Image (tube, grey):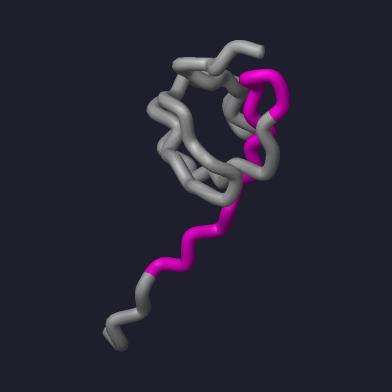
Amino acid sequence: MSTATTLTGTCPECETDLTVPPMAVGETLSCPECMLTLRIEAISEGRLTLEMIQVSLRDWGQ
């Protein structure tokens, strides 16, 4: 069994291929293409399952 030095996945929104350093399930990253925040849902054989997460903008009461 080899340890992957990078993980790969595809942005669910813009379908950009992503390569990231080793990360854990539950961590978040940003797609460099569409800037969406993605959460790692699963990792299987060096392949990421990514889920888009809603980022709520802070309401400063203006």
Q: Is residue 31 left or right of residue 13?
A: left
Quarter residue 30 falls in: top left
Residue at x 56%, y 19% (from the top left corner): 8
Camera-side residue of 43 and 31: 43
Compared with 1, 14 (above or below) is: below
Residue at x 40%, y 67% (from the top left corner): 57
Residue 14 magenta: no
User: Which residue is most to the front?
Assistant: 1
Camera-side residue of 31 and 4: 4
User: Which residue is most to the bottom?
Assistant: 61
Compared with 27, 43 (above or below) is: above
Whole-percent x, y for residue 4 in the image: 53, 16
Whole-percent x, y for residue 50 in the image: 64, 37
Residue at x 39%, y 28% (from the top left corner): 32
Quarter residue 1 falls in: top right
Whole-percent x, y for residue 31 in the image: 45, 32
Residue at x 59%, y 42% (from the top left corner): 40
Whole-percent x, y for residue 58 in the image: 36, 73
- Give the residues drawn in magenta, as a range: 44-57
